[in-house]
Image (cartoon, rainbow, N blue to C red):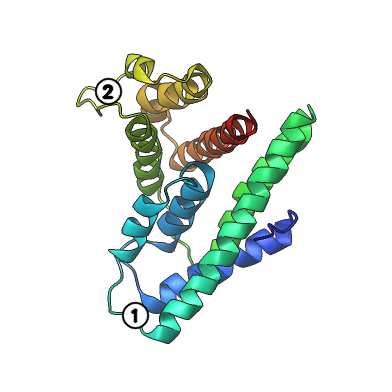
């Protein structure tokens, strides 16, 4: 399967289309939660996307018809390809030591996702949903390395992850969630900061996976 070249307009359009299909068929989770959850899976669950499909398939409010499934699958496939194109574009810029371009595409990825949701009529995007997804990322990485999820999770818990590079990626993410997130009083600022560090973490995990595949 050929991944398309990165295009902000195509990314935004794929988000809108996917969100519209989620709204059309109805789901217990919001289109915002599902689109970010899908981006998480495209970033760091490519070897085993089953947890993502479990989250998606378990929440539909009604039984889907064959037409529903076909339309949803097509929208999901397009979104996944565009998400992968975003991640590859950021990774290539980083690999070329063009930090400014990698940051620019990351910002576009966030704005394109939020704009695409808005195009679909989605107005509610909560930091509580975002925090839930951030915790999901950490738990999925721990599970991937067969590290038990502790009730009293701390930054030191990451020491059980054998991959040093992955620990370096996750440490600032976990530090923000444990120490900094709750200190930000303004809701919009809290949301923006969490979106930024979440997307930075996800593309870094994706890039690490590319490096490991090449070795």
x and y, in percent, of residue 97 in the image: 78, 26
x and y, in percent, of residue 10 in the image: 70, 63
Secondary structure category for the residue under label 1: loop
**Residue located at (47% from left, 52% from top):** 36
93 in relation to 180, above or below = below
Q: Which part of the image, by quadrant, shows the C terminus?
A: top right
x and y, in percent, of residue 8 in the image: 72, 56
Mark 1 vs mark 2, foreground winner is 1
Q: Is residue 118 visible?
A: no
Q: Which part of the image, by quadrant, shows the N terminus?
A: bottom right
Question: What residue did someone put label 2 on?
Answer: 153
66 in relation to 6, above or below = below
Identify the residue at the far front of this view: 215
Mark 1 in CB contact with mark 2 (< 8 angstroms): no
**CA gap, disc 1 and disc 2:** 39 Å
Q: Quadrant of residue 143?
A: top left
Question: What residue did someone put label 1 on?
Answer: 64
Q: Nearer the viewer, residue 181 or 159?
A: 159
**Residue located at (50% from left, 37% from top):** 198
Q: Quadrant of residue 95?
A: top right
Left or right side of 148 for 38: right
**Residue located at (44% from left, 25% from top):** 176
């Amino acid at each position: 399967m050929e991944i398309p070249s990165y295009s902000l307009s195509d990314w935004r359009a794929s988000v809108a289309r996917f969100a519209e299909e989620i709204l059309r068929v109805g789901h217990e989770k919001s289109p915002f939660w599902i689109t970010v959850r899908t981006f998480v899976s495209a970033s760091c669950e490519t070897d085993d996307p089953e947890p993502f499909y479990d989250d998606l398939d378990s929440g539909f409010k009604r039984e889907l018809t064959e037409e529903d499934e076909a339309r949803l699958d097509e929208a999901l496939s397009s979104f996944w390809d565009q998400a992968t194109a975003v991640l590859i574009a950021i990774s290539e810029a980083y690999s070329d030591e063009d930090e400014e371009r990698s940051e620019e595409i990351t910002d576009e990825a966030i704005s394109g996702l939020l704009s695409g949701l808005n195009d679909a009529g989605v107005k509610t995007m909560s930091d509580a949903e975002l925090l839930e997804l951030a915790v999901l990322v950490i738990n999925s990485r721990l599970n991937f390395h067969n590290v038990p999820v502790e009730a009293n999770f701390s930054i030191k818990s990451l020491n059980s992850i054998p991959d040093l590079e992955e620990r370096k990626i996750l440490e600032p993410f976990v530090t923000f969630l444990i120490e900094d997130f709750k200190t930000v009083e303004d809701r919009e600022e809290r949301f923006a900061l969490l979106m930024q560090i979440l997307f930075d973490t996800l593309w870094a995990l994706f890039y690490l996976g590319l490096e490991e595949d090449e070795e």
